[in-house]
Amino acid sequence: MELDPKIFEAPIRRDLLHTVSIAQLAARRSGTAAVKSRAQVSGGGIKPWKQKGTGRARQGSIRAPQWAGGGIVHGPRPRDYEVSVPKKVRKFALRSALSLRKSENGVIVVDDFTLDEPRTKLLIAKLKGLGAEDALIVTRERDTKLELAGRNLPHVRVLAVMGLNVRDVLLRKKLVITRAALEAVVERLS
């Protein structure tokens, strides 16, 4: 089958592939790490001892950072790690990733890729027949049988066209794509 040169023969921009991959990884981070500052630790409302005359260092609260059980100074706060990447750059990076796979003869177009039942053995046999044990399988719509069969295989990922992304294309050696999905990808990236 003839592949669209605008998508599968685009210039391979490794800098954009890196940028978009980093943005995808950053978006996965939850950013929920947090510790309590001295204002949030309970207790410590009274001076532990008077300011002068004891011979000890002055103290204002038992929840100051130098005390055991005190607040943490400059600890982690909840934050968002998201890196914004323009839509045009994301599209160009995906075209670049698909071009990289094609240049390595890693694109396999099939008429139809379905399973009668969600069995991992069936999926393995089908992929071996195609010579693609390490593969990203792209279908037009979500296929739950394929997803269930492939979720237990570490080197196989099943995605619908809407979920197609740079990182998954780069992580797999082969791209197995149905004809209908290919048309949808061309439509999405044109």
Image: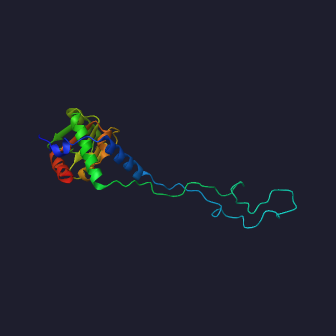
Image-quadrant location for residue 47: bottom right
Can residue 113 be seen in this snapshot? Answer: no
- Looking at the image, residue 80 sits to the left or right of residue 181; the answer is right
Query: How is the structure coloured here?
Result: rainbow
- Looking at the image, residue 65 sits to the left or right of residue 109; the answer is right
Q: Determine the residue positioned at 26% across, 40% down.
A: 12
Q: Is residue 82 above or below residue 11?
A: below
- Viewer-proximal residue among 133 and 21: 21
- Looking at the image, residue 55 sits to the left or right of residue 115; the answer is right
Q: Determine the residue positioned at 41% across, 55% down.
A: 82
- Viewer-proximal residue among 99 and 88: 88
Q: Determine the residue positioned at 29% across, 40% down.
A: 120
Q: Going by the picture, which residue comes out furthest to the left?
A: 1
Measured from the top left, where is residue 55 in percent x and y? 86, 57
Measured from the top left, where is residue 46 in percent x and y? 76, 67
> Which quarter shows the N terminus?
top left
- Viewer-proximal residue among 157 and 3: 3
In this rendering, the count of numbered labels is 0
Image-quadrant location for residue 123: top left
Measured from the top left, where is residue 20 in percent x and y? 34, 48
- Looking at the image, residue 30 sits to the left or right of residue 164; the answer is right
Can residue 40 be seen in this snapshot? Answer: yes
Measured from the top left, where is residue 164 in percent x and y? 27, 49
